[in-house]
Every structure is written in structure tokens, then in C-alpha cells.
Image: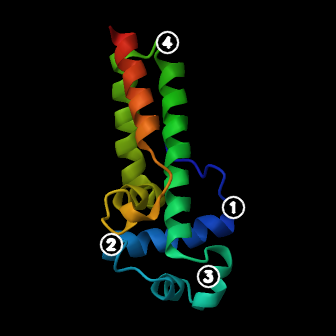
């Protein structure tokens, strides 16, 4: 299900490298220098697009939120009225996105990293809460 959302080709390439670094080493152990090195870039060239690890984390989470929204829309279009079938469909798409999209998977990793939790990243909880609650209300 994963789609490029609103990322440019350059952003996608840069975030793919950051994602692989984060998935291999964790957010806390990743550095701008190590991410840039994956691409054969200097830290300065990389930081032109993403000047800090927080900027990378924000971009990862925003990409994940965009894909969660797309998953929600897809499930609602597939299962009129949403309900439990819609919720299950969303959950399956989340698993699929985690498996095929390193940016999405890295966002999941960042969202539970103790260091990243202190960064005031976009909060996915209100989105999750509202989405799951609406599916459950529809199911009742």
C-alpha cells in the first residue's frame, strides 16, 4: 500500500538512507554524518535538506501520518461504514507499510525511542485515537 506521499525523489532518497541507519542502529545511535556517508555525501550537503536529526524524525513521522490517513481512506472506501472490517484492513495496511516502506518502519522505531520522545514530534496519538474510536463506534 505504501505510496511516496508528498516526498520529492530527493527527499525520498535522503529519508531512505536515514531510515536504514535508524532501523540498523536506532535513532539515538544514528548521526547526520553516518546517514550522509551512506549516500556518499558530506554531513553539510545532507544537512542542507535535513539540518538536524529532529528534522529527519519529523519528516519520518509526517510521512507515516500521511500513509495512515491514506490507509484510513482506503479502508473506508472498501468497507462502507468502516466497522471492524475497516479497522482490520487499516491494521493490515499498517503491517504491510512497515514491511515494504523503510521510512514508515523507521517512523515506528522513532516513535518509541526514548531520546526521540523528548523532541516534541508530531503526535500520532490523537489521530490513532480518533480513527480507532470511529471504527469501533461504527461497529457497534
Estimate the x, y position of residue 38 in percent, counting from the top left.
Answer: 49, 84
Q: Are marks 2 and 3 in contact (CB under 8 Å)?
A: no
Residue position for label 4? 80
| Secondary structure found at label 4 | loop
Q: Residue at x 42, y 20 (%)?
A: 134
In this rendering, position of residue 117 left or right of residue 55: left
CB under 8 Å between discs 3 and 4: no
Query: Which of the two marks, 2 or 4, is nearer to us in this view?
Result: 2
Q: Which residue is painted at 34% across and 44% down in the image? A: 95
Disc 2/disc 3 C-alpha distance (Å) = 19 Å
Using the image as rendered, state which of residue 57 and residue 10 is in the foreground.
57
Whole-percent x, y for residue 63 in the image: 54, 52
What percent of the width, then of the height, locates residue 17?
A: 50, 74
- Mark 3 is surrounded, within 10 Å at the Cα level, by few (under 14), some (14 to 19) or many (20 or more) other residues, namely some
Q: Tell me how far mark 2 sits from mark 1, CA to CA.
A: 25 Å
Closer to us: 116 or 32: 116
- Choose mark 3 or mark 1, whichever is in front: 3
Quickly name the residue at label 2: 26
Q: Secondary structure at mark 3?
A: helix
Q: Quadrant of residue 9?
A: bottom right
Residue where numbered disc 1 is placed: 8
Q: CA distance from mark 2 to mark 4?
A: 39 Å
Q: How many residues crowd mark 1 within 10 Å: few (<14), some (14–19), many (20+)?
A: few
The residue identified by callout 3 is 46
Q: Is residue 97 above or below residue 74?
A: below
Q: Quadrant of the C terminus?
A: top left
**Real-space Cα separation, disc 3 to disc 4, in angstroms:** 44 Å
The kind of secondary structure element at disc 2 is loop
- Say whether disc 2 or disc 3 marks the residue closer to the N-terminus: 2
Amino acid at each position: 500500500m505504501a505510496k511516496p506521499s508528498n516526498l520529492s525523489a530527493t527527499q525520498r532518497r535522503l529519508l531512505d538512507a536515514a531510515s536504514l541507519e535508524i532501523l540498523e542502529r536506532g535513532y539515538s545511535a544514528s548521526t547526520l554524518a553516518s546517514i550522509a556517508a551512506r549516500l556518499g555525501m558530506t554531513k553539510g550537503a545532507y544537512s542542507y535538506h535535513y539540518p538536524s536529526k529532529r528534522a529527519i524524525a519529523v519528516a519520518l513521522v509526517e510521512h507515516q501520518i500521511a500513509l495512515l490517513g491514506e490507509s484510513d481512506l482506503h479502508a473506508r472506501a472498501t468497507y462502507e461504514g468502516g466497522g471492524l472490517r475497516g479497522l482490520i484492513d487499516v491494521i493490515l495496511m499498517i503491517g504491510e507499510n512497515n514491511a515494504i516502506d523503510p521510512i514508515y518502519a523507521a517512523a515506528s522505531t522513532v516513535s518509541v525511542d526514548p531520546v526521540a520522545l523528548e523532541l516534541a514530534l508530531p503526535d500520532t496519538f490523537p489521530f490513532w485515537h480518533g480513527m480507532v474510536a470511529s471504527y469501533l463506534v461504527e461497529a457497534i
